[in-house]
Amino acid sequence: MGAEFVALSLPPILIGTLAALACALPGNFLVLRRQSLVGDAISHVVLPGIVVAFLVTGQVSAWPMMLGAAAAAVVSVALIEGIRRLGRVDAGAAMGVTFTAMFAFGVLLLEQSDTSGVHLDVEHALYGNLESLIWLDAVGWSSLLDPAALSGLPHELERMAIVFVLTLAFVVVLWRPLVLSTFDEGYARSLGLPVATLGLGLVIVAAITAVAAFDAVGSIIVIAMFICPPAAARLMTNQLVHQVLWSLVFAAISAVLGYVLAGYGPLWIGLPNTVSAAGMIATVSGLILAICAVAGPQRRA
Amino acid sequence: MSPLELVAENGLRAPDLTGDSPLAIRGMTVSYGDQPVVYSVDMTVRQGAMTAIIGPNGAGKSTLLKAALGIVAPLSGQVTVFGQGLDATRNRIAYVPQRASVDWDFPTRVSDVVMMGLYGQLGLLGRVRGLHRDRVQACLARVGMQDFGDRQIGQLSGGQQQRVFLARALAQGADLYLLDEPFAGVDAATERAIINVLHELRDEGKTVVAVHHDLSTVRSYFDDVFLINRRKMGEGPVEQAFTVPALQATYGGRLAEGQVAQLALDAG
């Protein structure tokens, strides 16, 4: 494993791993809050925001898209609350209506706008383009120390690293309020904690992560990583700190193993083609969850 | 009556002078949808007393407590705590929610839950030191749970869960304790342990307010009662306000005859 690995496999593995870590981290709280499907929901509702950002800026660039996506997420939350209160239906129904309507609106926008010149389509939204995130300037491991070569790294790597650090900072700094408002909302409110704002903040962080990861690795990984590593980690321990650490380990294993299996696995068993890395990473995370569900020490009887 | 009309009616009320009462509520109206659950309630809690909030199911007892703490938003009403606004006095209030309001499968240990009572002191990133751990242990000991610190909370019985919630409130070191049905579904030993702690608190000069269900223990446990059935139905020291006519008015004929007879007997 030398130059080829560094140029073709290392960047996507790192990007996939960072994306998996960044999703798994807030995923722990989403799973405990019974909001696991927020990741799924986000990847639906943000679509119109992303398309509008593209229409306004005329290019597929990350930060405007993220702002658009975050705006779409906020609009969705407002819509859900509005429908819930005005229509007097339960939250689940209001969410269902909002998510499908937002996604449908995004598809219509996408169809009506001229995105043929750029890489923005529904398929891309699902699978991402992990395999194409290669590092052409790399000539070997030594390139990791070469500033000129490093500047040629895919931008997605830098972006996912920033998003992961942001997510990490959010969870570390707001750990106590997040834990408290997740475990006992009434008590948290009695202490004067801004519970609603925290919940919204968590969803916004998840949305930012989802959108950043969406461009690089596709929404399949996003949905899987929000749920599978935290859910598997819950079966390993009864302490939230340990759960979060286990979830990061599982997310990293899924990303690395998934990518390697997708790229090399079929060759090992004599098949000529590789399979989708995004699909394989999500599959590995599902397998880890299955193993923990069968053999995890803290699974419920 | 629509919520807006309710607000209009209560808005006319001039703010009373509430002195330094640990908890004073004026013109509190809370509604879920169009249905008023608590209607124009005034309440003044006596310093250093144990007050029971009593009323039939759905009378708005828990809602009154939650609205007083800002956990649910009232349509109208003013709350003062020790003569000041809620935001200035939150660190003097400890709230014990209903046990059933949380998910006991949450991945956390007993000592972690009690430590939550110290989050106000610790702030966002303050380090947990030996003195904090000692305080957690002391609060657990006070409710007889000193050997359960490392247990996962899902392994506790209902009574033990309730004691952990009380220990968390104790850790806050508050002056006003608001408890939502602390004796609901707990064993007799837990009930005794909790009432002993609450009486100790009162004897230290703290003020305790609890939503309470069991009319037969009101007289022995509490100093004051607050009767509510959507509206305030009575308030005052037990011997004056906890009377058979007041209870019949509050419960609207829903008290069993045997209960009434027993209460009349207790009242002498």
Image: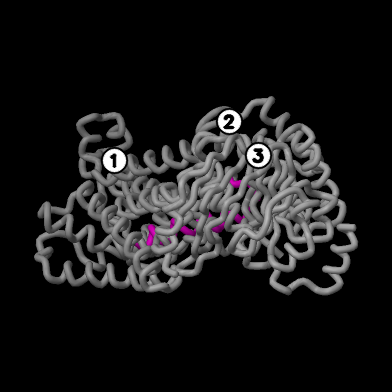
Q: Which mark is residue B176?
A: 3
The spot of residue B197 in percent (x, y) is: 79, 41
Q: Residues within 10 Å of mark 2 (few under 14, many from 20)?
A: few
From the top left corner, tell me how far across and down residue B147 is, in percent.
81, 41
Q: Is residue B42 left or right of residue B57?
A: left
Relative to the observer, which residue lies in front, B57 or A48?
A: B57
In contact (CB < 8 Å): disc 1 and disc 3:
no
Is A298 situated left or right of A231 in this image? right
* Subunit that carries the residue with mark 1: A
Q: Secondary structure at mark 3?
A: strand
Where is the C terminus of chain A found, in terms of image quarters?
bottom right
| Secondary structure type for disc 2 | helix
Q: Nearer the viewer, mark 3 or mark 2?
A: 3
Q: Are marks 1 and 3 on the same chain?
A: no
Q: Amino acid at mark 2?
A: Gln
Q: Are marks 3 and 2 in contact (CB under 8 Å)?
A: no
State the residue in front, A200 or A52: A200
Circle nearer the N terminus (3, 2): 2
Image mark for residue A158? 1
Which contiguous range is marked in magenta? A219-240
For residue A60, say whether it is visible. Answer: yes
Compared with B258, A199 (above or below) is above
- The residue closer to the viewer here, B260 or B214, is B260
Q: Amino acid at mark 3?
A: Leu
Label 2 marks a residue whose chain is B
The local secondary structure at tag 1 comes to: helix
Prevailing secondary structure of the magenta residues:
helix
Residue A216 lies, with reference to residue B246, above or below; the image says: above
Residue B135 falls inside the magenta stretch: no
Residue pointed to by mark 2: B121
Residue B131's image quarter? top right
